[in-house]
């Protein structure tokens, strides 16, 4: 097998000149190396994707964990999911605030509960009881996300449609193939800036924004409602398993279905041979992958993907 990890830090990037590309690439690289370290030691794919997403959650540049966006009423409500393709084990949380790393909350749900998805106060009580680390008050607040909320609310008040994709949505995620041929996926998000309290997107819904089985693994980012409508993750797998499409062909079909319902965004996906697909239909998508030898590639806009050897 060719152990491989692919990640994304959200679709809908800021315009060139308005951000520091080197900072985003450095964040992506740190996440790639966190997951690669596990794969290089013959660790399981589920551990690799978890480690990569933790690194992205800890980086305030990305809309997950510490960099999560605000709801319309100025609060944080985070979603996360993990899925182990070898067992079809799934764990997810939705609408929570408190756990320092929501992806670890999803892992705890998968490993210590009989359920797939936990929400609300019951989820927080369960996570505390199982030793998930919680952050101090204010940890998740960042000036940039607060300003993004003000900008969005002001645009709505003035009936302006001039909102960038980067202000609307963002998510982080990872997919991996380990040395034993197992696939896994993990996704984490703060959701959409200014979302209604209680809104849940595609991230914690298995088969929509997060999916892994024996054929492929997918982690999505973008307009979550659209990914839910087309069951993006399961659609990718079904095309590969039932229609015998290769990864790139199936990924293109899923992106076409996303566009057909007016959706914007993208995803990272990997198949059981280690081939990666990183499609998107926004201005850009923070993304990258790393091979077994540690050779890594990152991209933000429409850079050509490094050739496969």
Image: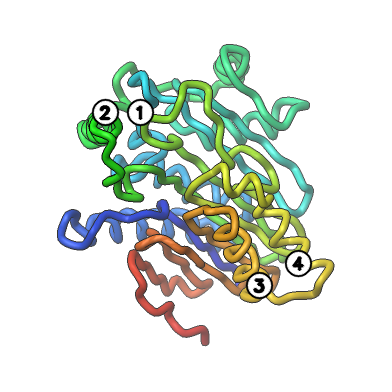
Q: Are circles 2 and 1 on residues that touch, CB within 8 Å?
A: no
- Kind of element beneath mark 1: loop
Q: Which of marks 3 and 2 precedes in the sequence?
A: 2
Q: In which quarter of the image is the N terminus?
A: bottom right
On the image, the x and y values in percent for residue 93 come to 59, 29
Q: Mark 4 vs mark 2: give the one in front.
A: 2
On the image, the x and y values in percent for residue 236 come to 69, 62
Residue named by callout 2: 157
Residue named by callout 3: 247
Residue named by callout 1: 70
Q: Which of marks 4 and 3 precedes in the sequence?
A: 4
Q: Are circles 4 and 2 on residues that touch, CB within 8 Å?
A: no
Q: Mark 2 vs mark 3: give the one in front.
A: 2
Residue 239's tag is: 4
- Kind of element beneath mark 4: helix
Q: Residue furthest bottom?
A: 309
Cα distance, mark 4 to mark 2?
A: 43 Å
User: Does 237 sit left or right of 140 as displayed?
Assistant: right
Cα distance, mark 2 to mark 3?
A: 43 Å
Total number of numbered discs in the rendering: 4
Cα distance, mark 1 to mark 4?
A: 36 Å
On the image, the x and y values in percent for residue 25 come to 30, 61
Q: Mark 2 vs mark 1: give the one in front.
A: 2
Q: Which of marks 1 and 3 precedes in the sequence?
A: 1
Q: Quadrant of residue 273?
A: bottom right
Q: Which of marks 2 and 4 precedes in the sequence?
A: 2
């Amino acid at each position: 097998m060719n152990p491989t990890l692919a990640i994304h830090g959200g679709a809908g990037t800021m315009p060139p000149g308005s951000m520091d590309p080197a900072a985003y690439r450095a964040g992506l690289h740190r996440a790639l190396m966190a997951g690669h370290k596990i794969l290089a030691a013959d660790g399981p794919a589920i551990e690799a994707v978890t480690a990569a997403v933790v690194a992205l959650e800890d980086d305030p540049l990305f809309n997950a964990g510490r960099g999560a966006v605000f709801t319309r009423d100025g609060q944080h409500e985070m979603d996360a999911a993990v899925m182990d393709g070898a067992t079809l084990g799934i764990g997810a949380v939705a609408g929570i605030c408190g756990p320092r790393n929501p992806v670890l909350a999803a892992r705890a749900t998968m490993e210590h509960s009989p359920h797939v998805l936990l929400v609300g106060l019951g989820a927080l009580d369960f996570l505390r009881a199982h030793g998930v680390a919680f952050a101090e008050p204010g940890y998740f607040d960042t000036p940039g996300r607060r300003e993004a909320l003000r900008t969005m609310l002001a645009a709505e008040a003035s009936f302006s449609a001039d909102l960038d994709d980067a202000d609307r949505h963002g998510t982080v995620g990872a997919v991996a193939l380990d040395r034993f041929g197992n696939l896994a996926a993990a996704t984490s998000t703060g959701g959409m800036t200014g979302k209604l309290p209680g809104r849940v997107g595609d991230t914690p819904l298995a088969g929509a924004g997060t999916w892994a089985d024996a054929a492929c693994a997918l982690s999505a980012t973008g307009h979550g409602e659209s990914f839910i409508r087309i069951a993006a993750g399961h659609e990718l797998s079904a095309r590969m398993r039932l229609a015998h499409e290769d990864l790139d062909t199936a990924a293109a079909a899923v992106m076409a279905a996303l566009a057909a319902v007016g959706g914007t965004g993208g995803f990272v996906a990997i198949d059981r041979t280690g081939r990666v697909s990183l499609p998107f239909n926004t201005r850009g998508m923070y993304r990258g992958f790393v091979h077994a030898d540690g050779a890594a590639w990152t991209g933000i806009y429409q850079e050509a993907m490094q050739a496969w050897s």
